[in-house]
Each structure stands twice: as structure tokens, then as C-alpha cells.
Amino acid sequence: MAITTLANIFPGKNKFPRLNILHSTRQLSSALMDKEHQDLSEDFFRFTRGRFLCNETEQLTQRHVEFNVKELAATAAGAIGATKCINIQKCTDGHYNKAFLLTMDNGKEVIGKIPNPNAGPAHLTTASEVATMDFMRNVLQTPVPQVYSWNSKANEENRVGAEYIIMEKVPGVPLGSVWESLEPPDKLKVFLQIFRYQKRWTAVKFSQFGSLYYSKNLPADASSRGNLYIDKDGRSVDHFAVGPTVSREWLQDGRQELQCYRGPYYRMAIGRREGMAIRTLKQFPKQCVMFCGPGAYQPTLEKKLAAVKLYSHILQHILPSETGLTSGHLWHNDLHAENIFVNPDRPTEITGIIDWQSIQIAPLTDHCLDPNFLGYEGPDVGDNPQPPALREDIDSLEQNERRAAIKQFYDTSVMVAWRMLVKKKNPDQHAAIRFQKSKAGHMLNLSQNLYVFGEAHFRALVLDLRDEWAESGKDFPLTFSATEISEIEADVKAADIGLGVMNMITERMGDLWPEKWFVEHENYEAAMAKLRDIKAELVEKAVRSPEDKEVFETFWPFDC
């Protein structure tokens, strides 16, 4: 679809006032070293980006990793033919990695990446990331950093003392630093490039699910060795292999410790994983999606296992049957504006895409198919999206409301253009998006995290599906007693109350709300103070007995 065709859903450039938004970017936090790499700071090893509002001690421990910085510098220099590294800067902490900008005596710069303990299983996480980057760069022609050197074994032979990857520094600036200043036609040019990459990813279909490795990095008897994917020309390829998944859904909230089958996996294994987690891990993890406690839903082992049992019985009836939705695909599921780099002089030119850790091969229905950088936060635009209209009263609105309305109009226009493009040019991706919005799609999505939350709504969706089958004259494969139906209906109402309470907390917190439990240092005290106030109000309203107080403290997720 040509740019001009897509662009006609937008108004003329001068028809409506331009939206001017100031954009701030996080600066690199530097730890400079002299030429002998002396006076090394502990900040290189620990998480320095901010504070955690839940289980902070454990959160920081999972993000602390020590290594030999001098050897990392020497390894990086040798990897690109430099004599020595003359400067190291620590990049802003990621939640799963430490990254460093290393400058050589010949002026060249590279990135050194060290995985945190919470990144995933030893060896497999790094080995899969490197193979994935190679495949994306050289097979799927995606602009991925070149890997110069790597080691997935933190053993005595590894002088760095930790797993590492030395890779190309992607030229350019993060898309997030320019996105809001781009005119709509230029935004279209950017997402057209992303669409072309995703279309290539769709074209390559794997016969197994899991994560990608070099064949040589898996055991000789691994069941995944052999011709494992079919290229766009119908040829099978065996240089790469599918092995155990390193996707974070298989690792987070204690799942990494489970002795369960990790791939090349299939859907039934997800239910087995969640069931094992529910039965064997010490307690349900804290979560900030839904308030649990007095007056709201309270999860129990029995209810969670009941949801897993329902999943195992209903699975074959809710899986998609279309061929394009059953094959495996390699996909980047976190295409936010800081993971995409563009040329600052020509910001519509993508120079690279970063962050390929923990990627897995899965059906399209399990991937994030609308890239996050689009920034759309409104209701779903639907299967047949229509160009939006700007509010008729735009000129009479207050300044802030007017700016918000203009921004929503532009964001919706971009999202509509994206969906129109996908529908017309990549039917499998469009079909997968449609499935994700269906009841079956919601059920499969909830099933992946039943250990943490979602069992009440999953069980209610099964009842809804039973009613739909009855209306169409089909026999449903499961039966429910009146007591079970009553319990499920009561639980989903209580869960909805819990969602409402957490939404209230989120709104009250405003900009202090801790995404991934995290806030900047300067906001920590204010965030904790506000949470203490909210907690006191909830205790006053919901706690009526010592038993209520115990339940409240059990499920309250924050360290206050």
C-alpha cells in the first residue's frame, strides 16, 4: 500500500493545529574509568536506575551481577581489532541486563551486555539470544546489531567471569526521541518499515515451538535437531535448532525453578507448567493487576487448579484451526520506541532494532502484533477500522483538553492506518489479531498466567462459551453443578471488584504508579507515602476482624 493511499486518512497538514509535545529522554548514567580501569565502582554491578516498591531486597538481588570489567574491556577490544579500551560508560539499567558503551583507542565503539540473574537460565539465555540475532540479521534481513564476540558459559575459562555479548553499537537515536515530533506521513513511513520486517517474520514458519539456538549448542540427541524451519521458498534449513524456551513467561515468579518440560513445547505444556507452579511453589506471587483481600476475590490453590483442569479439557476446542495460526514464528514482542533506532538526520530511516533476549518461537496468536511504539491507548479499532473524526467542538475546548483530543485523534489515525495495512497486506497477521480479540483468544492469553492471576475470569469465560454452544445447538464437552456455577459467578464479580480497586489505586498514584514495581529514586519517598495513605484508607473500609487484617496483609503487594 503506497504512502499516499495510507496518508489520505489524515487531514491536511494545516487543517488542524499541530500538536507540540516536549520529549525528554533518559541520559546514559556514566561511570568513567582511567586507562588502567582502576577505581571500579560497585555501580557497575548493581541496579542503579531506581527503587522497587515490592519485595525490593529480592528485586535488587536479581539484578546484581559481578564480573571482571577489565577483562570485558580487553575482550571487546580484541573482538574488533583495537589495541585497548580507553573508556567505559554504563548505560541505563535494564531490568534483565547490564549494558556498557566501550570506546576503543581507535575511536570505535561497541556495546557489552551482561545478563542479570533474573534474565533466564544459564547458558541457554545468552546462546539463544545470539542465535536469534544471527537469524534475524542474516536470514530475515532485519537490522539487528552484529555480534562480535560472546560467551554463554560463566566458567573458569571465561575471564570475564560472567556470560556476555559484545555487539555493534547501533547508529542513530531512539525512535522515542523523535516520534511525537514526526508528521503523520512520516510516522507511516516508519511503521511501513516495521511492517515489512514483520511480514518477513510471518513468512518463515517453524515446525516446533521453543527458542532458537545454533544446532551445535544443543545436545546431540536433542529432539529438536534436524530441518526445523521452512524458508519463504519452501526449503528446509538445519543450521539452527529449536530448543528449550527462554521466554519470560516460563521463568518469572519462580517458574525458572520448576523441573518441567520447556520445549520444543506445545500448548498442553503451558497448562502443566501452571499446574506445577500452583502445586509446588511456596506462595502465590504478588501482583498489581487486581486487588485481592477482604471484600474482593481471594485466590486459593483449589480454584487455581480448577482453572488449570478446565484448560486441559477445553484446550482442543479453543485452539485456532487456520494453518497460518498454528505454525511457529520468531517475533520481537517489545517494539517500543526505545528499542528502535533511527537516523537523526532522516528520522524515517530505521538504523537498528535492539533487545533480542528471551525471544521465543510461538504461534502468531501468542505474539504482540501491534507494535508498542504506535503509542495507541484507546479502545480497539476493530476488524474494519474507519478513519477517526476530530471532535466538532475542538476549538471551544480548554487548552489541555484540546491538546489531549488532538493527540488522541492523531494516535487513533496512526493505529487505524496500521490495521488497514496489516489487513490488506499480511492476512495471517490480521487473522491472528482477530483471534486474539475473540473469547478463545482471551482464554488462551489468561491460561498462560493462571499461577499469578486470571483464574476467576478464565472459569467465567468457560461458562460463557458453554452458553454460546448451547445457543447454537452444540453439545459442550463439560458439565457444571449448580454449586460450581454459583461459585464461578461470585468469584468473577469479586475479581471485578478487585480490578476496580487496583484501577483506583493506579489513578490515585498518577505518575508515581510503579511500572514493573519500579520508580525513580527521586519519586520513591513520595510514592511510598501515597501508598501508605491508600493502604490506610482501604484497611479502614475493608478490614472488620483480625482475620480480615491477616488476609489483607497477605495479599497487599507493596512494601508498606
Image: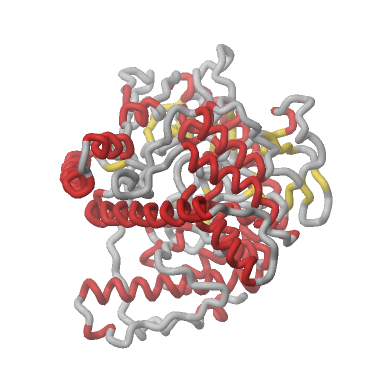
Decide: is 47 above or below 403: above
Q: Quadrant of the N terminus?
A: bottom right
Residue at 22% over, 71% down: 400
The residue nearer to you, when weighing 189 against 66, is: 66
Of residue 468 and residue 262, the one placed in the foreground of this image is 468
Q: Quadrant of residue 38?
A: top left
Vertical placement of residue 7 versus 63, above or below: below
Q: Please, which residue is most extreme toward the front here?
A: 482
Q: Nearer the viewer, residue 360 or 161?
A: 360
Q: Position of residue 307 (x, y in %)?
A: 54, 46
Residue 446 or residue 59, whichever sits in front: 446
Q: How many marks?
A: 0
Image coordinates of residue 78 in percent, x first then y, are 55, 25
Residue shown at 58%/65% (left/top)? 467
Q: Is residue 290 left or right of residue 453?
A: left
- Display coloring: secondary structure
> Which quadrant: the C terminus?
top left
Q: Is residue 215 left or right of residue 365?
A: right
Q: Residue furthest right?
A: 235
Residue 257 located left or right of residue 412: right
Q: Position of residue 129 (x, y in %)?
A: 59, 37
Residue 532: which quarter of the image? top left
Look at 56% across and 75% down and name the residue there. Answer: 3
Which of the 4 image quadrants contains residue 553?
A: top left
- Identify the residue at image location x=50%, y=19%: 160
Residue 506 appears in the picture as rendered: yes
Q: Is residue 194 visible?
A: no
